[in-house]
Image: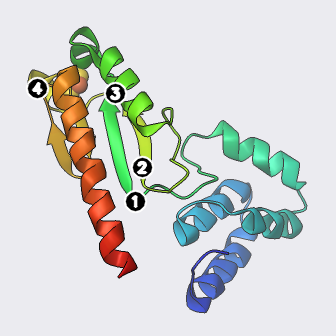
Amino acid sequence: MDIIGKKEIDHFKRDLIDKKKQDGSLIPLLQSAQDTYGYIPERAIYYISELVGIPAAEIYGVITFYSQFRLKPLGKNIIRICEGTACHVNGAKSILSILQNELGISVGETSDDGLYTLQSVACLGCCSLAPVIMINDETHGNLTTASLTKIIKKQKRIEKIKSSYDAN
Ligand code: FES
């Protein structure tokens, strides 16, 4: 069950009813669900399906077609890998494979513990530092396999400390 207040749910439902009056309301309805929950939960799909009279399976098809929509919440940490030209020629491929191994997820996925989401972008705007990744708001450039492994290990240590702190 999502942790979300009644106020947000009421807002979501009001928004849906307003948008339903528009033509081609499905996309705005899905955007509203995602804005409310941070992703599109199953129960929102069924609610929208009832509202617009489109089968839920068809709505799933639309969601998976558009990369802007998510069926799972984003992870606590967003890791973006740049696969633009400068990064590509400077080894983005090996950087990506280390990230995938270390995190146990592929691009577009979130780890089962909800700690990491891996995304790929076309350019992070700092090509002179290629290859580059961003962990949340922090940029890490001139990466080598060794430096990246170190960064990820450090990130994992920080998360471990945070979670043991939260548990107490
Ligand atoms: S191509 Fe990677 S930062 Fe621009």
Task: From the image, state whether disc 4 or disc 3 is nearer to you.
Answer: 4
Give the camera-side residue of 137 and 95: 95
Identity, as a three-letter code, of the amino acid under mark 3:
Ala
Q: CA distance from mark 2 to mark 4?
A: 23 Å
Which residue is disc 1 drawn over? 76
N-terminal of the pair, mark 4 or mark 3, is 3
Q: Which residue is mark 3?
A: 122
Instruction: Please tell me which of labels 3 and 2 falls first in the chain.
Output: 2
Identify which amino acid the numbered label 1 is placed on.
Lys
Q: Amino acid at mark 2?
A: Tyr
For this orientation, the residue located farthest to the left is 128
On the image, the x and y values in percent for residue 163 come to 36, 68
Disc 1 and disc 2 in contact, CB within 8 angstroms: yes
Toward the viewer: 93 or 104?
Answer: 104
Residue at image coords 56%, 40%? 67
Q: Mark 2, residues whose alpha carbon is within 10 Å: few (<14), some, or many (≥20)?
A: many
Q: Which residue is mark 4?
A: 129
Q: Is residue 102 left or right of residue 42?
A: left
- Judged from the image, the secondary structure of the residue bearing numbered disc 4 is helix
State the CA–CA distance, disc 1 to disc 3.
22 Å
Q: Is residue 168 above or below residue 136?
A: below
**Chain-order first, disc 1 or disc 3:** 1
Callout 3: SS: loop
Q: Position of residue 126 (x, y in %)?
A: 14, 31
Point out the tag, 1 or 2, that comes first from the N-terminus: 1
